[in-house]
Image (spheres, rainbow, N blue to C red):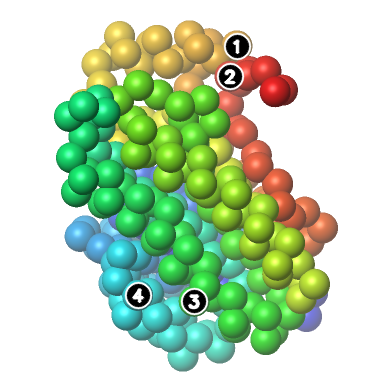
Amino acid sequence: MSDGTRRVALVTGAAGGLGSGIVTELARQGWSVAAGWHRHEPAHPMGDGVAVPLDVTDVRSVHRAVDGVLERWGRIDLLVNTAGIVSDALLARMEDPMWDRVLDVNLDGAFRCARAVARPMLRQREGHILNITSYGGRVGRAGQANYAASKAALFGLTQSLARELGSRNVRVNAVSPGFLRTGLVVDLTEEQLADQARANTLGRLNQIQEVARFVAFLAGMRNVSGQIFQLDSRITPWA
């Protein structure tokens, strides 16, 4: 935006490690931020921001959150779909509720939020939707069929929405942040974390603050849409 209007962002999963980092960085760069939270209210500086109850599995909660953003600031420029969960098990032991819950939060939640913000973004002919996906969605992991499927589906969702919304200047991109020390990996041992680091050509894991800075940078890019950005140094074949 070039008219001096303050930019407005909605971040889902803002109480988590990555969501919290993104909220903090956007606020530091002058955004007005609605920090969506479900079970735990975020407790970090938001500048001109507010914590918003938001359950991405509940369409009414999603619409209340988006309506609240519009009532408070009159517009919404950025949605960051950060909310995500894991529920790991090998296929033979993965029960239906484990599959359904992960897909409901990681994929369906992103869809619900994107659908809710699309109308105001299309109306203002300006907007950006960023989906947080995962390297696991690209290569798959044993014991994470539900998580990998949900994150892989975000690739297709991202590029389909980019095609659909681009004519009205709404960009849609995805960021694969790399392996981060967040609540999703709290059960891993230091040796397991070291194995993840060794899988990177640089021999180290990414950091939440660096991902947050990239998200804020990408949010301001006006000519980029339909792209998937991997933010670590793991290399996979082109095909």
- 84, above or below 86, in the image: below
Q: SS class of the residue under badge 3?
A: helix
Q: Position of residue 129 (x, y in %)?
A: 60, 62
Q: Residue at x 50, y 16 (%)?
A: 204
* Three-letter code, disc 4: Val
Q: Residue at x 71, y 52 (%)?
A: 226
Q: Amino acid at mark 1?
A: Thr
Whichever of callouts 4 and 2 sits on the residue coming sooner in the sequence is: 4
Instruction: Give the quarter of the image for residue 105.
Output: bottom left
Q: Which numbered disc, 2 or 3, marks the residue closer to the eye? A: 3
- SS for dot 4: helix
Name the residue that disc number 1 marks: 201
Residue 235, image quadrant: top right
Q: Which mark is residue 116?
A: 3
Mark before the other along the chain sequence, 1 or 2:
1
Residue 153 image label: none
Q: Residues within 10 Å of mark 4 (few under 14, many from 20)?
A: some
Q: Quadrant of the C terminus?
A: top right
Asked if the residues shown at circle 4 and circle 3 are in contact, with their CB atoms under 8 angstroms apart, the answer is no
Considering only order in the chain, which callout, 1 or 4, is on the residue closer to the N terminus? 4
Q: Is residue 90 left or right of residue 156?
A: left
**C-beta proximity under 8 Å, tags 1 and 2:** yes
- Under circle 2, the secondary element is loop
Q: Which residue is mark 2?
A: 234
Q: In this orientation, which residue lies closer to the viewer: 114 or 233? A: 114
First-in-chain label (2 vs 3) = 3
| Cα gap from disc 1 to disc 2, whole angstroms | 6 Å
